[in-house]
Amino acid sequence: MTASPARRVAFDVIRRVFEQDAYADRAFRAAAAGLDPRERALAQRLAYGTIHRVRTLDHAIETLGRRPVRKLDATVLAALRLGGYQLAFSEGVAGYAAVNESVELVRAAGPQRAVPFANAVLRRLSEGIGGLVEGLPESTPAEAALKHSYPDWVLDVWWRDLGADEALALARAQNEPQETVVRVVRGDVEGEPTEIPGAVRVERVDEQAMAQGRVWPQSRGSQLAGLVVGAVDGERTLDLCAAPGGKATQLAGEVVAIEKHPGRARELEENVRRLGATNVAVFQADALALPDGLTGFDRALVDAPCSGLGVLAARPDLRWRGEPLPELQLALLRAAAERVRPGGTIVYSVCTINADENEAIVAASGLEVDPIGDEWPAFRHPRRPEFLLTLPHRDRTSGFFIARLRT
């Protein structure tokens, strides 16, 4: 017996993420090349789900396997995590298949002496992991972080900002796959229109349409941020953190797109060309040290680097590596203010749900708030109606904080 192609791919992705610190999306693209669509979808669900739930899985492995995970061979641990995920969280997967194919992954990758141990632990997991996970409490942030598999600090932040019920709903939502949405660049797309103009909900991304620049995968929350900029023909807009280019290529008028990192700047240029955004000029530069001539803009977009707490469903490894970046966010916002003409507007958007990176940065900037809650009432911030805040558990899209400010 050998493991299925989907499980082999998931196993490879899990190992690369936790042994090589790889990004899950990039590791998956490389590992899944050549899989048929059905196997690819299963592989992604298993890989991403295991990475999402790894803290809870490790707790179960230690409790039922009676050995600290830090003492396990990396190959064995990856197989136990993958098998445990299927047994505890993956509906429609037969328990015997989860156990047997995980054992085969150990047998194929070694060490051989670990095969009996892996088999024994997986059988204990098959008997007990469901009840163990179901019985984990969630009445405090620390308990919820273990049950739903997040670092403690993330649940501390959500508990503080949203309250217990909302924090728990958000934690649950970001362990599940989200809708697939594309932005229609040109032509017609088969799918379900949404309340965001140009955003269409689809079963899957049409790879050919994407390669031809007719669609761009982009969540409704992300597209909303681009729309709030309000760029129009005849005006100049500065996008300070532009890669990979989803929002920059939404904007009308003359757009100057800045990206600091050379590789991401090349990717940005490729995407601009593919999407036919001839109005966008790409500059590889540090947004905090731009040439003096780049000034006098009518509008700016600061889609700042952040902890990413609104996109954890789509980027499963981010919860284990992300961190707040308030100093950088404030510096970028102030840099934008220096480049926008008096009376111009700046949109500050971050894909996180954390008041320390959201409302606090706006307050520290000293810029005048231009209220936008009435323009998009469905996405109005629950506590600060002058801002927008998309919430994965409420809006079924990625989480974005969006503010529009005036210089």
Image (cartoon, rainbow, N blue to C red):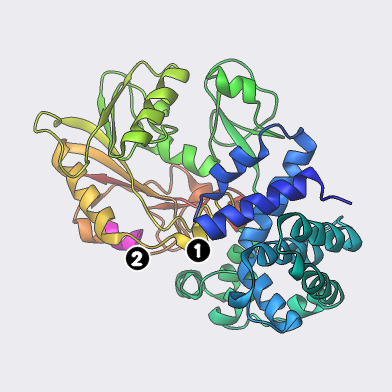
Numbered disc 1: secondary structure: helix
- Indicate the quadrant where residue 215 lies: top right
- Give the magenta part as a residue range: 356-361
Identify the residue shown where x is 37% and y is 47%.
349
Q: Residues within 10 Å of mark 2 (few under 14, many from 20)?
A: some
Numbered disc 2: secondary structure: loop
Identify the residue shown where x is 55% and y is 81%.
142
Task: State the residue position of label 1.
Answer: 320
Is 77 contained in the magenta span? no
Task: State the residue position of label 2.
Answer: 356
* Viewer can see residue 176: no
Q: CA distance from mark 1 to mark 2?
A: 19 Å
Q: Amino acid at mark 1?
A: Trp
Please state if 84 lies on the left or on the right of 176 as rendered. Answer: right
Q: Which mark is residue 339?
A: none
Image quarter where the C terminus lies is: top left
Query: Where is residue 50 drawn, in percent x and y?
Result: 67, 60
Identify the residue shown where x is 57% and y is 74%.
145
